[in-house]
Image (cartoon, helix red, strand yellow):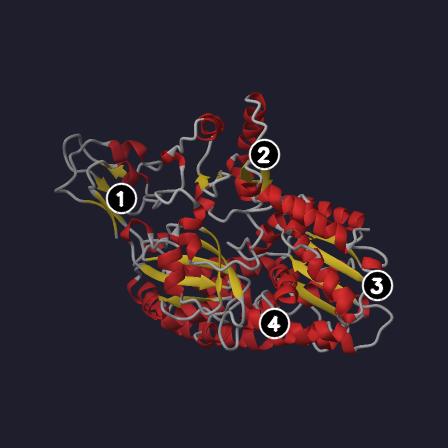
Amino acid sequence: MKSLEEMKAIRKKISSDINVSEKGTIRIITGMATCGIAAGAGAIFNKLKETVKSQNLKNVSVGQTGCIGVCQFEPLFEVFMPDGTRTTYVKMTPEKAEEVIKKHIIEGKVIDEYTIGSEKALDQTEFYKKQKRIVLRNCGFIDPESIDEYIAMDGYFALNKVLTEMKPEDIIKIIKSSGLRGRGGGGFPTGIKWELASKNEADQKYVCCNADEGDPGAFMDRSILEGDPHSVLEAMTIAGYAIGSTKGYIYVRAEYPVAVKRLKMAIDQAREYGFLGNNIFGINFNFDIELRLGAGAFVCGEETALLTSIEGKRGEPRPRPPFPAVRGLFGKPTILNNVETFANVPQIILKGSDWFNSIGTEKSKGTKVFALGGKINRTGLVEVPIGTPLREIVEDIGGGIPNNKKFKAAQTGGPSGGCIPAKYLDIPMDYDNLTAIGSMMGSGGLIIMDETNCMVDIAKFFLDFTVDESCGKCTPCRIGTKRLFEMLTDITSGNATMEELSKLEDLCHYIKQNSLCGLGQTAPNPVLSTIKYFRPEYEEHILNHKCRAGVCKNLVQYRILEDKCVGCSACSRICPVGAISGELKHPFKIDPQKCIKCGECMKTCKFSAIVKE
């Protein structure tokens, strides 16, 4: 078991290794999260180690880290020099990595064309400078497979503090006064949830972590687990002490193999150091954590379905009340928070509730991590103070919309959320403001859309997902979402009437009011928000059989402009169904009855003679 003095010694030694200026060494770290590995970071990491060894560079260390945050630049690595300069090399190959070692490390010449931009370092870019990192404080900086590097960043010092200096009720008081709300989507006050569980007497209580991140486009929790798994273990142990629990479970998606691997390593390391197990830090407190792998069911992100799945049963929701804090896992008092919520806890303990309370808005404290994706120049992982305007995230951090297109909408909360139209681009991103306009914070997926997106098709996409993921336990969700999807299909096919649009809205409200769990209750949100803010598009689909974005194939026609067609026959030769005919050097024509709207002719034409209407 590691004592406080031993932890301080580790922190002193390892922090000097990480902060290379103290030792006059050079540090290279490669982004080895799922995104980086998929882009080829493994080969680059190996090449860096191989080259450093072959060049006998004794003063250079090569390490790995989790998600650095700039997805569009993967694979990448960063060089930290003794003089304090930091250089971010992006879109790397093994050959480029070897060149960086020889020119930058050995000769001292930065290869400008391989860097992230004119700033050369990620922390100098607008993408990074506008962020405030609490949850992601260690992601992209420490080796997630090293408990010593976590300790060097004050890891497990919060656990030591609560166990040796505080009573359980003191912890709950700090979490309550901090204003921390659940980051899984609902925004329920974390301290109140812990307090409810602590007051319920039982021979066994449980602390559970929801790492079943299922929203399309969301990767916040995965990145935290891959980049800083010990922060979650430490927080769960603190929660266990606060409510009187000795057992914790992390329910993580089996589709996250890197996160699962690093969680297993972190649990083994924490047990070895005595941060999990019996008599932690020499006091009479026992706590341990196990992993449970989810099978990919979106409904298991709902708290009661998740707990049912941990019990080994089919993942279906249970009626509430009773709530899990009263009767949860195996019928015992249970608290369930998601990964991001837990990752805030150690910093709140170390820095105090007043510090955390000073960040964010009056009712929404702290920061929020967003997975920024879609039609945006800079995709990636973003952490900003809650209340940051959407415009600042889109334009300043995200770099705006590509190809000079206009911002049309932002989808928050995934299938459970809603679309924010351009007129609300300046809205502060917090729980209450988003709820007021028919959207929600959600777990943090933030999908940006431009004028080439059809909002009816977007609603249909999310309903298709929800239909597949409904557990089928309650009729409003099982049957209702299927009917919603069929109605949306009729609209996008040009086969609907205005009466059907009215029925669509009525069914949405019925499903929201009568579904058993949060999945069904929020499933209509993408439909209702798009009808509310983009109703003219629905009416165009129904009345004019027109899709202004040109996305709905049944409502689109391709036409050849006679004055631009030179009769080269390229379009005719590429057409897979023979829908284009004509004579060489004369304008060709498209038969709309045969055309399957694949768009290959338009891609092939070099004279811009084919238009989509």
Question: N-terminal of the two: label 2 or label 1?
Answer: 2
Residue beneath disc 1 = 591
Foreground: disc 2 or disc 1 = 2
Q: Is residue 257 above or below residue 353?
A: above
Residue beneath disc 2 = 61
Q: Measure the C-alpha gap from mark 3 to mark 1.
A: 77 Å
Residue at the extreme top of the image, as rendered: 54
Q: Is residue 305 above or below residue 601?
A: below
Mark 1 and mark 4 residues within 8 Å of each other at the beta carbon: no
Foreground: disc 1 or disc 4 = 4
Count neighbours of disc 1 (C-alpha within 10 A) and say few if under 14, some if 14 to 19, many if 20 or more: some
Question: N-terminal of the two: label 3 or label 1?
Answer: 3
Q: Secondary structure at mark 1?
A: loop
| Residue 177 spot, x, y in % from top left | 62, 76
User: Residue at the spot x=64%, y=44% of the render?
Assistant: 258
Count neighbours of disc 4 (C-alpha within 10 A) and say few if under 14, some if 14 to 19, many if 20 or more: some
Q: Secondary structure at mark 2?
A: strand
Looking at the rendered structure, the kind of residue marked 1 is Asp
Looking at the rendered structure, the kind of residue marked 2 is Ser
Q: Is residue 325 above or below residue 455?
A: below
User: Residue at the spot x=48%, y=43% of the render?
Assistant: 84
Q: Measure the C-alpha gap from mark 2 to mark 1.
A: 64 Å
Mark 3 and mark 1 residues within 8 Å of each other at the beta carbon: no
Residue beneath disc 4 = 353
Residue beneath disc 3 = 285
| Residue 256 spot, x, y in % from top left | 63, 47
Question: N-terminal of the two: label 4 or label 2?
Answer: 2
| Residue 483 spot, x, y in % from top left | 52, 66
Q: Is residue 578 left or right of residue 527?
A: left
| Residue 478 spot, x, y in % from top left | 60, 65
Evaluate whether residue 319 shows in this view: no
